[in-house]
Amino acid sequence: MGYKVAVIGATGNVGREMIQTLAERNFPVSEVIALASERSVGREISFGEDKILKVKDLASFDFAGVDIALSSPGAKISAVHSPRAAAAGCVVIDNTSHFRMDPDVPLVVPEVNPQAIAGYKKKNIIANPNCSTIQMVVALKPLHDLGRIKRVVVSTYQSVSGAGKEAMDELFNQTRAIYVNDPVKPQKFTKQIAFNVIPHIDVFLEDGSTKEEWKMTVETRKILDPDIAVHATCVRVPVFVSHSEAVNVEFERPVDENAAREALKNAPGVVVVDHRANEGYVTPVEAAGEDPVYVSRIRKDPTIKNGLSFWCVSDNLRKGAALNAVQIAEVLIRDYLKK
């Protein structure tokens, strides 16, 4: 027996990826409903090889009878419609930032803390973490089990798709403009993104960090361990899809480099590609369209006690958003919503 699933924000980058992921993973659906703003009503979206979904108006949609909603319409819209869906009896898996730090809403990465899904009953909402947090904690979990992590210092290299379709268009248009000697006008970003990097994602906070950096800190603590110290620097780079991260970890006790590599190799959701030779690592281009978190460049950090560094790359639209949400739904129907 299938589940009735609504995708909120179906015309966006993540919404389309959610619909595609449902089809690819043969999620047991009886019906998929594509929802978006009034201006998108009637647009057609492919579901699987032979089905077409016509977009319906989110504002007027009645969620009664819908089992699960995958929501990614933006935080302000989600703040209105996710509780409305939840009140109608639908379990909402929300990809926006709005509910992540709500103590009554579980923040879940299935490879890391699937047991937290049980808390969904408080509000009928489960939060999907930030894309950069997801890939990092997937890689940190087996290492934390191995040696207990005290501190993480991470620098991210985040693709423009994390800022939406308009951001991807801006990178494309600026790149073309530079080649034909046209003026470059930043619109979505604060500075030129083509052939450049911007150390600024989301708004600045009083302490000088950005909200994206704050998210990585507080979300990691909520998902993995409240005692882990995290210091992040988040940078937007001229890459269309896939985020990369350089991660430095300090453990409470000595961790052998080879043991760490084996733990990562055996961890769910992780693929280790770590050869100390040309091409012996994964870059954003190779990760695009793929499900795993790829880990490379694993090595000891001799400058601190019990230190280790690694590089990780993952498709931010898949594992960083749509895939993680669908995986949560898979655990939900397996353990809690059995029909």
Image (spheres, rainbow, N blue to C red):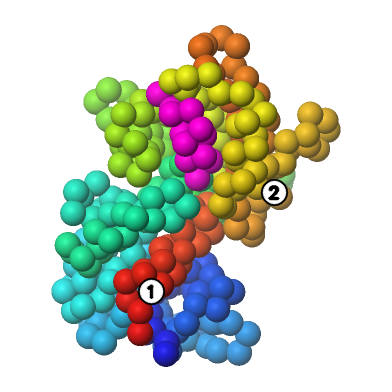
Quadrant, the C terminus: bottom left
Residue extent of the magenta highlight: 138-151
**What residue is shown with label 1?**
333
Residue 142: say if magenta: yes
Q: Which amino acid, by three-letter code, is at mark 1?
A: Ile
Question: Helix, strand, or loop for circle 2?
Answer: helix
> Foreground mark, 1 or 2?
1
Left or right position of 122 against 312: left
**What residue is shown with label 2?**
285
Q: Where is residue 257 in the image (x, y as percent from the top left)?
A: 64, 25
Q: Distance between the residues labelled 1 and 2?
A: 33 Å
Image point 55% across, 78% down: which residue? 26
Q: In the rendered image, is residue 313 in sight?
A: yes
Image point 42% across, 90% down: which residue? 1
Q: Position of residue 76 (x, y in %)?
A: 25, 58
Quarter-of-image position of residue 91: bottom left
Q: Residue 93 carries which label?
A: none
Q: Which amino acid, by three-letter code, is at mark 2?
A: Val
In the image, residue 156 sits, relative to residue 25, either above or below, namely above
Question: Helix, strand, or loop for circle 1?
Answer: helix
In the image, residue 306 sits, relative to residue 263, either above or below, namely above
**The furthest residue to the top:** 303
Left or right position of 42 against 236: left
Q: Which residue is nearer to you in this view: 284 or 180?
A: 284
Image point 41% across, 72% down: which residue? 334
Precedes in sequence: disc 1 or disc 2:
2
